[in-house]
Amino acid sequence: MRRHGTELTNYVGLIRIGARAVAGLPLGGGALVEACELVEGAGMPSRYRLLATAREYTFFQNSEQLAVTLAGRVGNPRISPTPPLWPLLALLLLGWRDRLSADRVMERAAWLGMENEVERGLAIVAYLFPELQEWTADIPFGMPLWERTLAVPLAARKLVGSANMESPASEGSALGSSSEFLEETGRQLRWRVGGASRRGSSHVRSRLPNQDAIEYWASPDGNTAVLAVADGHGSALCFRSEVGSRVAVTTAVESCRKFAMTVRSGESVSAIADRARAVLAEELTESWRAAVASNLAAKPFAPAEWACLAALEGWKGQQLVQRHPELAYGSTILAVVATTTYVLCMQLGDGDILFVDCEGDTRRALPKDRQLMPRQTASLWRRDAAAKFRVHVQDGSNDLPVLVFAATDGYAESCKSEHELMEVGQHYLAVVRNAGLNGLEHQLKSFLDQASGTGTADDTTIGFISRLDQNSHTLESVPLGVRHGAWGS
């Protein structure tokens, strides 16, 4: 502990030097990188990866968003402390605290539902740098006193010590082996993507359209695949949800495809996840809103639609849609980006994204929402949609799944139990190995025929992304296109 205490004093001093050097510069990612370069040059050990990590966060244009992201990760005990982010947060606050508003930082944290983590992260850095306590004085910390006086100092010292658990030599060899692994994996991985959607029998009887949609794309070399499925809401208020779901998958695939092209080689999964939450989620929702607005401008609500809405929801329903016309297009969205080095999953609303490993073991990429009391349905039409996205990034160094399924909630509801749902991995993996992906698509068609006609009789959509190790299964380039209501409706 004495050694860590000495190192703590040294590193805190280096960060103060860097912060003073950039205090007069305009706040931005470039200045933060310059500060980190100065700190590393002054003696910060390379195992902190300070400069490399700072470059991963230069995409943030909003300083409050950057502060929230860094503080939220520093204050979340479930997130790995490597690479350390507390020096970046300290440099940001020390160098530009006169231009950063603690109130606005906490307002944004509240909007994102990250108050507890951000409070803890700010308290940790303020413990390491007492001069920041004046900046945090106006924050109404909700954590109990014992946590601030006991747990925060322990967490601060643990974070400082965590970067010293590996010697520079072992760190270098670990990074080298990981890089070699990713390069080798990149040469072998080839992704194939597909899927289908079926209108439920209940919609057939009521003459409603298929409100699910699916779209997918794969690069010609198979190194990148994108899949999106959406479920338009069945409420009478969402009377154009079949359009909303089609728009959702189109904008999701295009936004995710562009996002994948911006990921730099060697970028950490934590930085990819942060960018997906802060940038991709916002871009996807705004693109959806713009497309919905264009559709409404080209095809205004018809008198028959207003009359039907009034009959089912009354004048209050009409008023609600008049105030929020995008409600008529309400939809969920699930999106998956698979590359040679990571798999990114994003989910807003119901549905499941399932990972299947080479043994057929199946798990959810994102845990099921265990809330006892239902909340408002998460939907693209809501103003806070971007903040409600759940995000997971699977690191390629921890083995990428061999199969990824994305399905609307009609799929899980057609299964008799959670156990039956989790058995799909072994079944479909066996199908792929025995009959290839054409066999898998045939099996999915048969399942969807059965599920839509019986089960919950709801619309059901399943998409898959697969990587094959068998050379006998050739990879085909999949063009970009909507497969809405595929195999009949």
Image (tube, grey):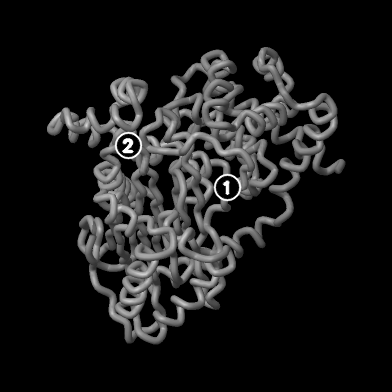
Q: Which residue is mark 2?
A: 238
Check disc 2 and give the amino acid type.
Answer: Cys
The image shows residue 50, relative to residue 225, as above or below, that is above
Left or right of 377 on screen, residue 132: right
Q: Nearer the viewer, residue 201 or 214?
A: 201
Residue placed at 35% from the left, 85% from the top?
A: 435
Q: Are marks 1 and 2 in contact (CB under 8 Å)?
A: no
Residue placed at 32% from the left, 37% from the top?
A: 238
Check disc 1 and give the amino acid type.
Answer: Asp
Q: Nearer the viewer, residue 207 or 46?
A: 207
Crowd rating for badge 1 (residues with CA inside 10 Å; few <14, some 14–19, many 20+): few
In this rendering, does residue 232 appear at all? yes
Residue 213, numbered label: none
Residue placed at 30% from the left, 49% from the top?
A: 211
Left or right of 357 on screen, residue 314: left
Left or right of 296 on screen, residue 38: right
- Return the x and y of residue 142 as percentages of the image width and height: 72, 23
Kindly state the secondary structure of the residue where label 2 is placed. loop
Mark 1 or 2: the one toward you: 2
Image quadrant in which you'd find residue 241: top left
| Mark 1 / mark 2, whichever is N-terminal | 2
The image shows residue 318, relative to residue 39, as above or below, that is above
- Return the x and y of residue 269 as percentages of the image width and height: 51, 52
Q: Nearer the viewer, residue 263 or 108?
A: 108
The image shows residue 325, relative to residue 245, as above or below, that is above
Residue placed at 53% from the left, 47% from the top?
A: 270
In this rendering, does residue 95 appear at all? no
- Return the x and y of residue 321 as percentages of the image width and height: 31, 26
Q: Nearer the viewer, residue 386 or 15?
A: 386
Q: Which residue is mark 1?
A: 369
